[in-house]
Image (cartoon, grey):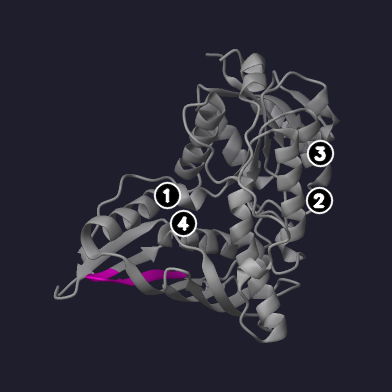
Amino acid sequence: MSPLRIILVGLGARAQFWMRVVRDNPDCTIVGLVDPSETARSRALEQWPLATAAADVSLLGQIEADAVLLATPPGGREAQMEAACAAGLPILAEKPLADGVELAARYVEMAETAGVPLMVGLNFRFLPVTQKVLKLFDEQVGLPEFGRFTYERWRDGWKPNFNKYPLTMDQPMLWEQSIHHFDLMRYVYKSEPVLLFGKTFNPSWSMYRDDANVSALITFASGVTVNYQGLWQSNWQAPGFQWRNECARGVVVQNDQFGDLNYALHSDATLTSVPLPPYEQWINDAVAVLAAFVAALRGTAPLLCSGRDHLSSLRMVQACILSSQLGQAINPADLDLGAKREIGPFNQNALQQRTSL
């Protein structure tokens, strides 16, 4: 099989991980590099000297390729999405797809109309710890009924290896971090939210222009209720994380967002630690995301984390913002925007002709 030829759009901090992950995947290669920064293009060409580099997405219609990987900020992707769809190229996009539900819904419609698959890189679903949590529900403690999700961090947005756009974006914690957590809840609870009461705020010491902290009470259709607190601007440099789920026969306690998983049955005196495989942060999960994308394009697996499904997680973010503004609970489903159709089929035959599968 010929490797999938990928055009990488956006050559900032996140792209450095993707270049390594693609290099380690024999099913993929990078043939195009797009970024307005000449410095970024030159740096990327040192790693991919045979690729074609360009300052804008006009490259997508000029070279032979099989897919586009958007490692770009969520704001300002209109031209990128239009170019990818016009070229008929499947899209793997960093989350969130857009910094607004209405715009994301337009992107989803655009991709479906063009007949190209659109996958969002929701890498937290692919973490080994996430998969183990699902198994604990099934095999040990029973279904969850309520939980507490706490994420506490003093995120230094000026660190040189961080993208700088969150410093000035609207609701950076929600759009950049909580989107992961909300999506995880939908995925792990296998249920959709029906009520969300949220409050966003920004402490006096915050380096972010807009609210970097959020609290929310979320109720799902299954009956699960979650107390959520997400902080990008706590006032202690030591991070804190705990996701505790109270289940039919006991508890599941995750003390690190990438591991430290434990459970206990109701009568147990202590928690039991759950062994997890070795894990390299930001690499192993990206490896799994890329493998899932490739499998979908090869036709050996369904498309996961579709743009259409992603809209439900984005609605949670939007509902939290609206709830904070209005001071009342919101049903995310009320933010429909006409985006509830089933995922449309993509043109597998056209893809096969391009990739010689």
Left or right of 22? Residue 46 is right
Determine which residue is flagged by label 2.
76
In three-dimensional space, the C-alpha distance between marks 2 and 3, rounded to whole angstroms, equals 11 Å
Q: Are marks 1 and 3 in contact (CB under 8 Å)?
A: no
Mark 4: which secondary structure? helix
Give x and y (percent) for residue 277. Answer: 31, 45
Residue 17 x/y as whole percent: 57, 40
The nearer-to-camera label among 2 and 3 is 3
Q: CA distance from mark 3 to mark 4?
A: 29 Å
Distance in Å between CA atoms under marks 2 and 1 = 29 Å
Q: Earlier in the sequence, mark 1 or mark 3?
A: 3
Task: Report the front residue among 201 and 85.
Answer: 85
* Mark number displayed over residue 199: none
Residue at the disc numbered 3: 82
Q: Of the residues shown, which amino acid type is indicated by label 3? A: Glu
Q: Nearer the viewer, mark 1 or mark 4?
A: 4
